[in-house]
Image: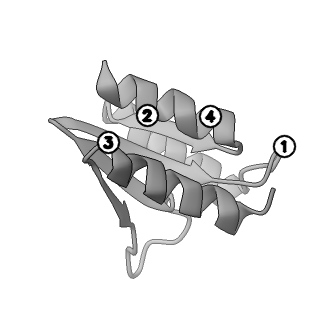
Amino acid sequence: MRESKIEAYLRRRVKEVGGLCYKWVCPGESGVPDRIVMYRGKVWVVETKTHNGKLSDLQAYQAKKILQQGVNYMVVDSVEKVNTLVRLLLQ
């Protein structure tokens, strides 16, 4: 499945449960994840990829920085992983 389709599915599923799924645009800072997902006090930073897609070195560096701050981070590369993220939001 194409990355754009996975990202669209992510947006749709998060909206269905009442959450927010904002595109993250960070001028001057390359490699940041695609989306910030928020639901009832829970925040996840999400990188979308095609199935078996690999993070670039810069994306991996940004992921490490985010995780070091104690922020929830996930790579979603399938419908199943989007559904897993939604289940985590609803817990």
Front: mark 3 or 4? 3
Residue at 52% across, 44% down = 63
Q: Dots 3 and 2: beta carbons under 8 Å?
A: yes
> Identity of the amino acid at label 1?
Asn
Give the x, y percent position of residue 32: 49, 61
- Report, in whole angstroms, how far the alpha carbon at label 2 lies from the one at label 4: 9 Å
Residue at 39% across, 67% down = 24
Name the image quarter holding residue 71: top left
How dense is the environment of label 3, judged by Cα within 10 Å: few (below 14), some, or many (20 and up)? few
Q: Foreground: 80 or 73?
A: 80
Give the x, y percent position of residue 69: 31, 36
Check disc 2 and report the residue beneath it. 86
- Label placed on residue 52: 1
Check disc 4 and report the residue beneath it. 81
- Report, in whole angstroms, how far the alpha carbon at label 3 lies from the one at label 1: 27 Å
Q: Dots 3 and 4: beta carbons under 8 Å?
A: no
Label 3, secondary structure: give it: loop
Mark closest to the chain's N terminus, 3 or 4: 3
Mark closest to the chain's N terminus, 3 or 2: 3
- Label placed on residue 17: 3
> Identity of the amino acid at label 4?
Lys
Front: mark 1 or 2? 2
> Identity of the amino acid at label 3?
Val
Quarter in which the C terminus is drawn: top left
Label 4, secondary structure: give it: helix
Name the image quarter holding residue 84: top right
> Can see residue 62?
no
